[in-house]
Structure formats: structure tokens, C-alpha cells
Image (cartoon, helix red, strand yellow):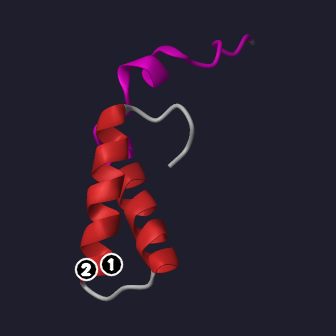
Amino acid sequence: MLAGSSPKRERQYEHIKESYQDKGVSAGEAKERAARTVNKERRESGGDNEESEVAAPPLRR
């Protein structure tokens, strides 16, 4: 996972990765699937509070 990920997301990533490996998926494929799943969950939940506080300044017209 990326540096700065929350401990919850790190645990989620490791659990998903290990689950895929237990099912016989290669290590590289398991890592990619786990990362995609965690990113999808984060995106759908609106992200972490720390990340959502940073926003682009409004456009001036």
C-alpha cells in the first residue's frame, strides 16, 4: 500500500491479499486486486477524513 495509508486500510489490504493468495492467485495479481479493492472501498466511502479536508481552491471567474 501507499505510504500514508490508514492502519485500517493497511489491515484491509493485507487481509484481502492473503485471501487471494490462499485461493491460488499469484502474489503480484493478489497485490493488484487487493489494492484495487481497497481503493474502491475508500472511494465509495468518501475517503478518509484527513484526505477529504484537503480540497482544491475554488475557481475564480
Q: Is residue 57 magenta?
A: yes
x and y percent of residue 59 in the render? 69, 16
Instruction: Tell me which segment is drawn in magenta.
Output: 41-60
x and y percent of residue 42 in the render? 35, 42
Quadrant of the drawing holding the C terminus: top right
Taking the image as shown, residue 45 lies to the left or right of residue 36, namely left
x and y percent of residue 58 in the render? 63, 13
Residue position for label 1: 21
Helix, strand or loop at label 2? It is helix
Amino acid tagged 2? Asp
Taking the image as shown, residue 58 lies to the left or right of residue 61, namely left
Q: Is residue 3 magenta?
A: no
- Asked whether the beta carbons under mark 1 and mark 2 sit within 8 Å of each other, the answer is yes
Residue at 63 percent of width and 19 percent of height:
56
Q: Is residue 46 visible?
A: no
Against 30, is 4 above or below?
above
- In space, the residues marked 1 and 2 are separated at their CA atoms by 4 Å
Using the image, tell me which numbered label, if any, was put on residue 22. Answer: 2
50 and 9: which is toward the camera: 9
Against 2, is 56 above or below?
above
54 and 1: which is toward the camera: 1
